[in-house]
Amino acid sequence: MTTSNEAAAPNLEPLQEQRLHEILNPTHTALLVVDLQNDFLSPEGKSSAMWHQDINAMQATLPKIEAVTNLFYAKGRPVIRTRTYEDPELRTEAGRDRFLWFEGNDREGEVACLKGTWGSELYTPARDGDIVIEKERISAYVGTELPKVIAEQALKTLVVVGLKTQRCVARTVQDLYDNEPSLHVVVLEDCVASDNTALHDATMTELKMFYPPVISSEGFERVWQSYEDKTT
């Protein structure tokens, strides 16, 4: 026996599909590629070579991110890349305290992506025309040029990919939701990753629950292919 609420519950799948198609209209959509940098992704970077973290999951996203990025290039849509700097001297006062208390005051051994080092450079080089945003905090939104870019490009949707799921990706998504009420944020679940599988999985559960839509790169490509079909 069903309750009246259950009986009245609409089938949202067709509505969601139609809405997603509207949200991902290429004419107002840009790609945000978060922190694909040598210290996180290269076998010679600090994550792998110094800290012996497992970078395989992060490396595995790269072909899918490249495929999505190429779709944006093909349509002449903006590709925004972020570079994070974790230098203690660039942090807030609380961040410097964290460095002293929890990172052992070891700048070279404990801090990735120091400004001016090879480790901070983009693992996947930017192309001509890419918008590169430098950041000194976890979020790609707070204290960066991203709000200005969103306004100047008249963006209505940002597709988010990159690293690391539980930190820079999640914080960026949350800040965009909180501060850009007219902007849609779409996370591609197979194009974000971390060196910590448990934290990645927990964060993805939260993003799907509280910050939808979260879709696959295949689903994204299918939506954009439908726009091509209409123009051919």
Image (tube, helix red, strand yellow):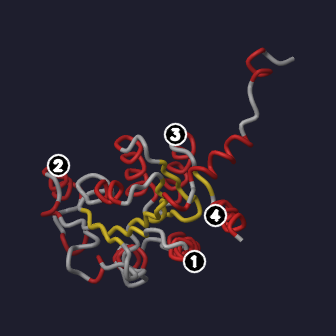
Q: Nearer the viewer, mark 3 or mark 2?
A: 3
Q: Dot 1 surroundings within 10 Å: few (below 14), some, or many (20 or more)?
A: few
First along the sequence among labels 3 and 4: 3
Q: Which of 15/9 is in front? A: 15
* Mark 1 → mark 2, Cα distance in angstroms: 37 Å
* Mark 1 → mark 3, Cα distance in angstroms: 28 Å
For numbered disc 2, what is the local secondary structure? helix
* Mark 1 → mark 4, Cα distance in angstroms: 18 Å
First along the sequence among labels 1 and 3: 1
Residue wearing tag 1: 63
Where residue 119 appears, as percent x and y from the top left, is 30, 79
Q: Which of 51/80 is in front? A: 80
Say if mark 1 contacts mark 4, CB within 8 Å. Answer: no
Which image quarter holds the N terminus? top right
For numbered disc 4, what is the local secondary structure? helix
35 left or right of 14? left
90 left or right of 38? left
Where residue 165 appears, as percent x and y from the top left, is 46, 58
Residue wearing tag 3: 210
* Mark 3 → mark 4, Cα distance in angstroms: 25 Å
Residue wearing tag 2: 94
Which image quarter holds the C terminus? bottom right
The residue furthest front is 231
Residue wearing tag 4: 224
Q: Dot 4 surroundings within 10 Å: few (below 14), some, or many (20 or more)?
A: some
